[in-house]
Image: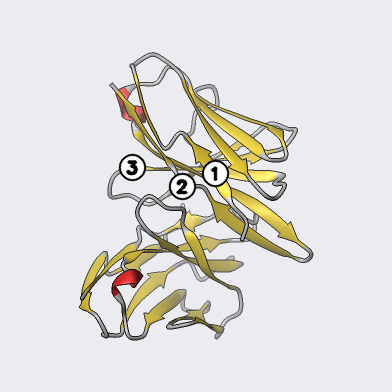
């Protein structure tokens, strides 16, 4: 089946620095990818929709200048958490949409744990 | 804000038991209901995508039903095995964008040998 790979799985960064998380569709092209965040004991919450070759669409309450999304190719979307603070510590996970004829399937990456110290 | 709720939050069963859990979602603007199985340190694995009221889908020992009019879906596991232990997520899609999912909190299933 289709595979989405996310990297890194774990990252610890200092407060005030930026960290980049990559999401790759390994065996298919994805014009649309999605970034979610999950805080402890909460649901996965959609942060933004990443569109290849155009600007990302952010959900209400998500700061676009803080969470920079770049989808420069059909197989790669990146999420950069800029000037990270401890409250940004969370689990981040991406998904990619595979279009097959009239159908669509969503595949998820493995997720990335971010800890800001 | 869309409200998707799953119950119970966690469940412990013995090997061989059958079990089921619930996902409730808005009954308006329904497009699709997704079920995922999520093991620790792995990617969520798609189980079912359900779109039609009254739909019932089956994959091995796992099956799911859908009632879009009242806004709920049931996931059933027959003869649970330890390898079924995982978090089961449901996610609602209102059709505004395929892949834009609103998730429930999940049901954590632990199957004891």
Residue annotated with mark 1:
A5
Q: Determine if marks 1 and 2 fall on one subunit.
A: yes
Q: Chain of mark 2?
A: A
Is there CB contact under 8 Å for labels 1 and 2? yes
Residue A95: image location, x then y, percent: 56, 48
Residue annotated with mark 2:
A110
Disc number for residue A39:
3
Q: Looking at the picture, does residue A30 appear above or below residue B113? A: above
Q: Quadrant of residue A103?
A: bottom right
Residue B79: image location, x then y, percent: 32, 85
**Discs 3/2, front:** 2
Q: Earlier in the sequence, mark 3 or mark 2?
A: 3
Image side of residue A75 versus residue B16, left or right? right
Residue A81: image location, x then y, percent: 47, 25
The residue sitting at 47% across, 74% down in the picture is B71
Q: CA distance from mark 3 to mark 2?
A: 16 Å
Q: Secondary structure at mark 2?
A: loop
Pick the front one: A44 or B110 = B110
**Discs 3/1, front:** 1
């Amino acid at each position: 089946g289709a595979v989405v790979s996310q990297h890194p799985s774990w990252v610890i960064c200092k407060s005030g620095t930026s960290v980049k998380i990559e999401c790759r569709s390994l065996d298919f092209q994805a014009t649309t990818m999605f970034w979610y965040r999950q805080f402890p004991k909460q649901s996965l919450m959609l942060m933004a929709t990443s569109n290849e070759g155009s600007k990302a669409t952010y959900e209400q309450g998500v700061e676009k200048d803080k969470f920079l999304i770049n989808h420069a190719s059909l197989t790669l979307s990146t999420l950069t958490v800029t000037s990270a603070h401890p409250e940004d510590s969370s689990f981040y996970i991406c998904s990619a949409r595979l279009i097959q004829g009239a159908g669509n399937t969503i595949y998820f990456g493995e997720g990335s744990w971010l800890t800001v110290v | 804000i869309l409200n998707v709720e799953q119950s119970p939050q966690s469940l412990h069963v013995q090997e061989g038991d059958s079990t089921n859990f619930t996902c409730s979602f808005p009954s308006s603007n329904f497009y699709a209901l997704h079920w995922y199985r999520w093991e620790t340190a792995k990617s969520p694995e798609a189980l079912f995508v359900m779109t039609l009221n009254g739909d019932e889908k089956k994959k091995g020992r796992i099956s799911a039903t859908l009632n879009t009019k009242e806004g709920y879906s049931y996931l059933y596991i027959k003869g649970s095995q330890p390898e079924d232990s995982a978090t089961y997520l449901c996610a609602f899609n209102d059709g505004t964008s395929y892949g834009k999912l609103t998730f429930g909190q999940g049901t954590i299933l632990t199957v004891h040998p």
